[in-house]
Amino acid sequence: MREQTAPLEPEVGQAHISVADVLAAKARLRRYLPDTPLHHAERFGVWLKLENLQRTGSYKVRGALNALLAGLERGDDRPVVCASAGNHAQGLAWAAWRLGVTAIAVMPTAAPATKVAGVKHWGGTVRLHGNSYDEAYAFALTLAQENGYRFLSAFDDVDVIAGQGTLGLELAPHAPDVVIVPIGGGGLASGVALALKSQGVRIVGAQVEGVDSMARAIAGDNRAIDPVPTLADGVKVKIPGFITRRLCAALLDDVVIVREAELRETLVRLALEEHLIAEGAGALALAAGRRVAGKRKCAVVSGGNIDASVLAGLLSEIRPRPPRKPRRRTPDRLRSGQTGRAIAPNFPHTSLIATAVEETPR
């Protein structure tokens, strides 16, 4: 582990986000993105929020689209540049295509071919640079500064966080008692927690062993980590964001650390038993679910953009254990059409004010 610390507390600007911002994001996105379905995975005893069926195959399009729409409302129609290993870049490319904005994605040279192709498909410009996300990130910042582009973080941006939180609003009418969310930089976990804490829902994060920068940051260790190789390449973050680590520390009930072998087996079981294709990060919340108590558990399948060769290798190599036989009772169901307390824009525990610069290094 390198002795690099988390980004210094930003010097200028105020970043304020509350559940009201999530509600505003929902109003913006309603005409562009349909609600994604819920699926009851009986063999796992968990409900699944299927963001692998979202546009571009990942929840990331929520935050990217909300950020562009909010920017246009403020009169900001500059070209947008991002650094991404794949899903954020694809979401931004789709959103930019939909709104007529120019998008540039800086991606590491080893980015999955399917994700590079996805960005290009929607008209985004791809710049392959560096051997790691950090090198791509630094180059993207340089492009933004030299050309006057808007830089859009994959997670440490209030508009992005609010957009990701719309996933939580879609779950609210079904009254889960716990929602399990994968964590990389923390944008999804922060947004979902903002949306659901007013209903008393427990929010549990999931990370992979050796790729647990958020769990360490919450515990007070803000040094950068050197992530180990993992199937969940979408959550390999060395340092969580300034805004997101404060939101997660304030709002998450727990963070579960999953072993790599558990993650790989869960992904294969999803394909064979539930007939659902997920990428590594997409199966992470479900892998953590066995260690989370709850009668109405919901795990977010955050994405399904996995290379065909990787999936084929997993299916040929891994033989999952037989599932447990079902109990002789009616499964607990999420309560369709019933809500807990109303989601109030002024709920006291769903607001965070943090001093922040416009662009916080990862």
Image (cartoon, grey):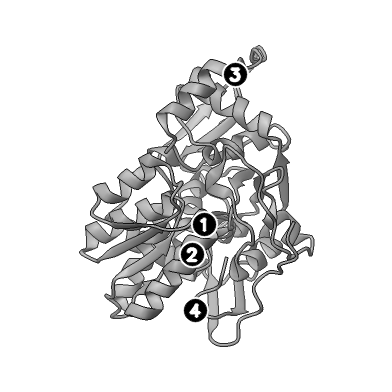
Which residue is at the front of the view, 10 or 292? 10
Q: Which amino acid does label 1 sit on?
A: Tyr
> Decide: marks 3, 1 in contact (CB < 8 A)?
no
| Spatial CA span between label 3 and label 1 | 29 Å
Q: Which of marks 2 and 3 is nearer the N terminus?
A: 2
Secondary structure under tag 3 reads loop
Residue 141, by quadrant, is bottom left
Q: Residue furthest bottom?
A: 12
The residue that disc 3 covers is 318
Between residues 150 and 29, which one lies in front from this camera angle?
A: 150
Q: Residues within 10 Å of mark 1 (few under 14, many from 20)?
A: many
| Mark 2 element type | helix
Secondary structure, mark 4, is: loop
- Residue indicated by mark 1: 133
Q: Name the residue under label 4.
A: 358
Q: Which residue is drawn at 56% across and 88% down?
A: 12
Give the residue number, with chain letter if any, for mark 2.
137
Q: Earlier in the sequence, mark 4 or mark 1?
A: 1
Residue 26 location (% of width, % of height): 39, 60
Q: Residue at the left extreme?
A: 100
In the picture, the quarter occupied by the N terminus is bottom right
Q: Quadrant of residue 145?
A: bottom left
Question: Horizontal placement of 55 versus 203: left or right?
Answer: left
Mark 4 vs mark 2: which is more N-terminal? 2
